[in-house]
């Protein structure tokens, strides 16, 4: 499968633009054709088939821009319209669909083929679409293939052409060629058969016009032939004596004068006469891929020897060789200005090279889940946040997870700057987001230098890979050459076993320490990490080991603490649904005692009972949990910011003018989950300002009734009315737009909290809204509805994970409030995402 390639041709010039190895997700149809991948005309987007779905990737970042559930059966053909505004997909379900590229909206479904769609092609003006079904391009004798022409604007079929094989339009779009034992030329406007030319007796591979439209190339399994379209004469059987294998690839020079072929040989032919011009000698194995630059002066080639070679077309001399791939070279393409060369290898790497000096610029790696990572030779990388778990760093014989070096090397600004072509404002935004990240973590660039003093820590006990015991004991040694040790941290699946403060080592005033650690293992995977901090706050690299616990499974218990305050001592701040939010969530979980959970322990703390003391005391219940149990903490009510922009939860007796007196800080709330035995912990915050505030980029403004209007929104569910009350202060963004959002979206949060997954109803600068229509806060309503209806089950596997719930709630709340409220993940322990509902009864009572 690694040998299949997709070729993208410029519809105006006929020049080869891309020749790349098919990814693991792209579709190889039953006839061996590459069918499931296509670039947009401006090369900004990559369209890929993923079984029955379509994925649109942003080429600059590697991020998935859109996923579309497209067909009932596998996708077998794709094509972009020449203006990039539409694209078409064909499938084994015998249908073709035309899509709006900007929003993924389905424009037309084309029906009429009786077999799987094997090829699609737009005319250069984008007004017509040609589709082929049936035999494809391998064994024509076994199939009767049909080509249909469609009007793109209406989706109406224009006509059916009875022919077979590969299809190609001439550069002006007036002629459609179909290849096989006979090559048929059609008038693409009328469908009239213009000429039938003799093709190959054996099965063919492809058909292509020269850029000037005067010559047609027909590549077969044994030879590549040229056909003069004015006379119909065949010339130049391009399979020299002594070479029995066919060309693996053939491409015309931009001026249509030369044809380059690759295979056991690398040769140049005169495209007008078929005469051999020269053989290029240098490769030590089979040549898979070739590409001309836009001027036709340089030819790039690559193959079995894992080396890319650049050749002078005029002299045949090798200019330079590019080395870096660890597998065969499968695809090559020059950038439009010829300054860069892209290569794709069987090592699952795509590399970008500087043509002038032959140096590697960046390497792209596609992950199994469709995410992409871009890396520079000096280890800087750009990755979608979801791809971070697939990154590790290796130094000598030791491997470290991405968190160890993410702060230093996760630099999208550097990667994009080296790639070239990216918007300078975007690069600057990424740079500022990175600098903001350093400040949030109390780091300076100097602290990331190679000379910065770090403690060292090592697990000195040999640990098993698997164990049937649910306990584990081991010894740890920590040292520091310069400074006294401060504490030792132990994490299992990113959950701090000894709380966020770890094991205190300060009392010893020593630069070395040995500690015996005893752990309770959870069933399944346990990623154990140990680190040491010195008195200067520097943390060692984390010693990491994984142990799988095969102890007999036990049904977990669920612990729920539901806090809701609608009634306040200052009645002018009373809410309508906060206490009901807490009660509704608790009731939903209670229904699962004896079902998903052995026992469900619920503590409701509502209205007048919701004092600081009563809320803090709830930790006594959570301390009774066990390692495999699950905990849900929910709070609903007022969230306030003081004049320092610090968050406080509104207890029933809070002083709204001095929230620090009786309110609860975020840290105090999260402390309920810190250090408890259970490791699966979810914290739901349905309050205003529940997300983090970027104190650098906001200012305080007076909160008045005018700044908290009644909101009326028309939705599919009816009219939503929500009210945000004046709550101490209001904040307004003043800094670089989206810098904090970029920080949260692009970078993993390396701060180690309680290990809980925290979903907040609104960002730090937003209000959380209530709805009379649903008798809940919008955030809580969406959680209840998403779980009860199963709509939050994004992958439809029968369970709803925390990550799925977070994504569903963020999308739905934003829609229902017309963007006025956007839930955020305040902290995300994505290492320990867990299922909330599998086999659970979450229906309404």
Image: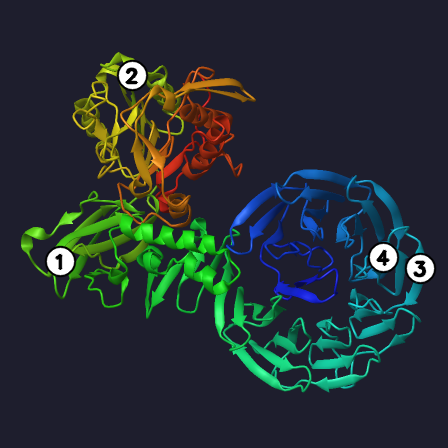
Q: Earlier in the sequence, mark 3 or mark 2?
A: 3
Q: Earlier in the sequence, mark 1 or mark 3?
A: 3
The disc label shown at residue 612, or none: none
How busy is the neighbourhood of tag 2: few (under 14 within 10 Å), some, or many (20 plus)? some
Q: Calculate the distance from the C-alpha at mark 1 to the C-alpha at mark 3.
A: 86 Å
Above or below: residue 794 compared with residue 259: above
Q: Name the residue carrying label 2.
A: 573
Q: Earlier in the sequence, mark 4 or mark 2?
A: 4
Mark 2 or mark 1, whichever is nearer to me: 2
Can the viewer see residue 262 in this picture? yes
Mark 2 lies on a secondary structure that is helix
Comparing 533 with 630, the one in front is 533
Q: Calculate the distance from the C-alpha at mark 3 to the C-alpha at mark 4.
A: 11 Å
Q: Name the residue carrying label 1.
A: 514
Mark 1 or mark 3, whichever is nearer to me: 3
The disc label shown at residue 174, or none: 4
Comparing 160 with 333, the one in front is 333
Give yes or no for contact between labels 1 and 4 (Cβ–Cβ under 8 Å).
no
Q: Calculate the distance from the C-alpha at mark 1 to the C-alpha at mark 4.
A: 80 Å
Q: Calculate the distance from the C-alpha at mark 2 to the C-alpha at mark 1.
A: 54 Å
x, y (%) of residue 546?
Answer: 32, 54
Q: Quadrant of residue 535?
A: bottom left
Mark 1 or mark 4, whichever is nearer to me: 4
Q: Name the residue carrying label 3.
A: 194
> Looking at the figure, which quarter contains the N terminus?
bottom right
């Amino acid at each position: 499968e690694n040998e299949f390639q997709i070729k993208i041709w410029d519809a105006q010039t006929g020049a080869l633009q891309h020749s790349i190895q098919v990814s693991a997700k792209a579709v190889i149809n039953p006839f061996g054709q590459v069918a499931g991948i296509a670039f947009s005309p401006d090369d900004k987007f990559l369209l890929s088939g993923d079984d029955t779905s379509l994925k649109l990737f942003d080429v600059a970042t590697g991020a998935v821009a859109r996923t579309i559930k497209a067909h009932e059966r596998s996708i077998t053909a794709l094509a972009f319209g020449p203006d990039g505004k539409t694209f078409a997909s064909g499938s084994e379900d015998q249908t073709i669909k035309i899509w709006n590229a900007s929003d993924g909206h389905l424009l037309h479904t084309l029906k009429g083929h009786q077999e799987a769609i094997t090829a699609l092609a737009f005319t250069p003006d984008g007004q017509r679409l040609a589709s082929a079904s049936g035999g494809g391009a391998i064994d024509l004798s076994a199939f009767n293939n049909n080509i249909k022409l469609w009007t793109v604007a209406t989706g109406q079929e224009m006509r059916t052409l009875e022919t077979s094989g590969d299809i190609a339009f001439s550069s002006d779009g007036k002629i459609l060629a179909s290849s096989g034992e006979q090559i048929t030329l059609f008038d693409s406007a009328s469908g009239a058969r213009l000429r039938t030319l003799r093709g190959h007796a054996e099965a063919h591979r492809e058909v292509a016009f020269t850029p000037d439209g005067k010559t047609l190339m027909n590549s077969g399994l044994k030879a590549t032939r040229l056909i003069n379209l004015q006379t119909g004469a065949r010339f130049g059987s391009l399979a020299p004596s002594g070479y029995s294998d066919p060309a693996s690839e053939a491409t015309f020079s931009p001026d249509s004068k030369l044809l380059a072929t690759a295979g056991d040989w690398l040769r140049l032919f005169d495209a007008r006469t078929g005469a051999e011009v020269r053989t290029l000698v240098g490769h030590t194995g089979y040549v898979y891929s070739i590409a001309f630059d836009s001027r036709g002066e340089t030819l790039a080639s690559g193959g079995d020897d894992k080396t890319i070679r650049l050749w002078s077309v005029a002299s045949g001399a090798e200019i330079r060789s590019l080395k870096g791939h660890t597998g065969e070279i499968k695809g090559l393409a020059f950038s439009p200005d010829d300054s860069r060369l892209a290569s794709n290898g069987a090592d699952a790497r795509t590399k970008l090279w500087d043509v002038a000096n032959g140096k590697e610029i960046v390497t792209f790696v596609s992950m199994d889940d469709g995410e992409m990572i871009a890396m520079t030779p000096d280890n800087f990388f750009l990755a979608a946040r979801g791809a971070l778990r697939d990154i590790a760093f290796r130094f000598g014989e030791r491997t470290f997870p991405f968190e160890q070096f993410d702060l230093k090397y996760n630099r999208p600004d550097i990667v994009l700057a080296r790639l070239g072509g990216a918007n300078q404002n975007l690069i600057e935004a990424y740079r500022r987001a990175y600098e903001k990240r350093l400040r949030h973590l109390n780091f300076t660039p100097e602290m990331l230098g190679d000379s910065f003093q770090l403690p060292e820590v090592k697990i000195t006990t040999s640990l098993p890979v698997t164990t049937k015991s649910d306990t584990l004991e081991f010894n740890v040694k920590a040292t520091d050459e310069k400074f006294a040790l401060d504490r030792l941290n132990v994490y299992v699946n990113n959950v701090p076993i000894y709380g966020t403060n770890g094991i205190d080592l300060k009392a010893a005033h020593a630069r070395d320490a040995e500690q015996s650690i005893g752990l309770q293992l959870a069933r399944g995977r346990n990623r154990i990490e140990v680190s040491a901090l010195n008195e200067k706050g520097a943390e060692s690299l984390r010693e990491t080991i994984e142990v799988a616990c095969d102890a007999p499974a036990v049904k977990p218990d669920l612990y729920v603490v539901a806090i809701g305050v609608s009634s306040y001592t200052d009645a002018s701040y009373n809410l309508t649904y906060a206490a009901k939010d807490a009660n509704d969530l608790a009731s939903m979980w209670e229904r699962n005692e004896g079902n998903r959970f052995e026992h469900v322990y619920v503590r409701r703390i509502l209205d007048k009972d919701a004092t600081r003391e009563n809320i803090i005391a709830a930790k006594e219940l959570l301390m009774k949990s066990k390692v495999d149990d699950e905990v849900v903490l929910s709070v609903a009510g007022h969230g306030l910011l003081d004049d320092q922009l610090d968050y406080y939860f509104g207890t029933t007796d809070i002083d709204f003018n001095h929230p620090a007196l009786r309110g609860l800080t975020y840290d105090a709330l999260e402390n309920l989950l810190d250090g408890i035995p259970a490791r699966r912990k979810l914290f739901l915050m349905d309050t205003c300002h529940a997300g983090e505030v970027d104190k650098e980029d906001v200012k305080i403004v007076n909160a008045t009734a005018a700044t908290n209007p009644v909101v009326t929104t028309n939705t599919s569910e009816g009219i939503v009315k929500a009210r945000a009350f004046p709550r101490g202060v209001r904040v307004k963004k003043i800094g670089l737009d989206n810098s904090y959002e970029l920080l949260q979206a692009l970078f993993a949060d390396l701060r180690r909290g309680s290990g809980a997954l925290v979903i907040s109803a609104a960002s730090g600068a937003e209000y959380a809204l209530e709805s009379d229509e649903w008798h809940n806060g919008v955030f809580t309503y969406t959680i209840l509805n998403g779980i009860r209806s199963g709509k939050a089950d994004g992958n439809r596997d029968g369970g709803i994970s925390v990550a799925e719930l977070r994504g569903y709630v963020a999308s739905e709340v934003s829609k229902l409030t017309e963007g006025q409220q956007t839930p955020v993940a305040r902290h995300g322990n994505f290492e320990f995402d867990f299922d909330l509902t599998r086999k659970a009864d979450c229906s309404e009572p």
